[in-house]
Image: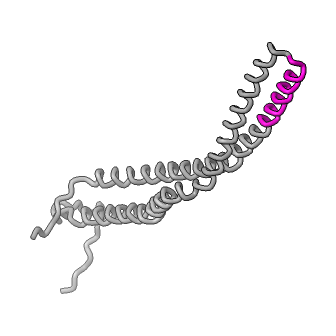
Amino acid sequence: MATHAKITSLDALERFRSSLIVFLNKSRSALDQVSDEIRRTRAWIQHDQRTHWENEARKRARTLAQAEQELLSARMTKALDNLSAQQLEVKKARHALEEAADKVRKIKRWVRDFDGTVDPMVKGLNSMRGFLDHDLPHGIAYLNQVERIMDAYIEVSKPSPSPAETPAPASAEVPAQPL
């Protein structure tokens, strides 16, 4: 077993620790962005889209009712040329209403299923958050401690200058030695 280590540079250890700190900061930022995006998506589905398509369905139902009323008026006046145009308008309005109703059903299903679909992924993010908030800072602190230990080791293992190489103080008084 070797009795000493040959340490030439601590730069690689310092660069690694610095890279971990950068990674930690960027990762936390990315997790914050993902969490915010999940919240925005949930709100968008539950509120914005639901409200939009429910309002759109009501609007399209009014349009269909109006088109059906115009078709009924055209039938009563026996305007055959206008009758086919009115039938086409009713058909388009009915299709538009069915589309809006389908969107409302899908959005209700998305609202119902959103948490069940996203929660497993959020748990993974929370696990990563725990790693970033707890484990990685401990690792960085450990690397910092290793650096200090290695620095102290390098200082201790440096050869001390011999007495001949040590310059004497300029006004050195030699203490009297007892005989």
Residue 145, image x, y percentages = 35, 65
Residue 55 quadrant: top right
Which residue is farthest left?
1
Which quadrant, please, contains the C terminus? bottom left
Residue 172, image x, y percentages = 28, 66
Relative to residue 145, is residue 15 depicted above or below? above
Residue at 26% in and 76% down:
175
Residue at 90% in and 19% down:
77
Residue at 42% in and 50% down:
23
33 drawn magenta: no
What secondary structure is the stretch in magenta mostly built from? helix
Residue 129, image x, y percentages = 48, 60
Residue 71 quadrant: top right
Which residue is farthest bottom?
179
In this rendering, would 72 be left or right of 35? right
64 drawn magenta: yes
Relative to residue 105, is residue 178 depicted above or below? below
**Nearer the observer, 2 or 137:** 137
**Nearer the observer, 6 or 129:** 129
**Nearer the observer, 25 or 115:** 115
Which quadrant, please, contains the N terminus? bottom left
Range drawn in magenta: 59-78
Residue at 49% in and 59% down:
120
Residue 127, image x, y percentages = 46, 62
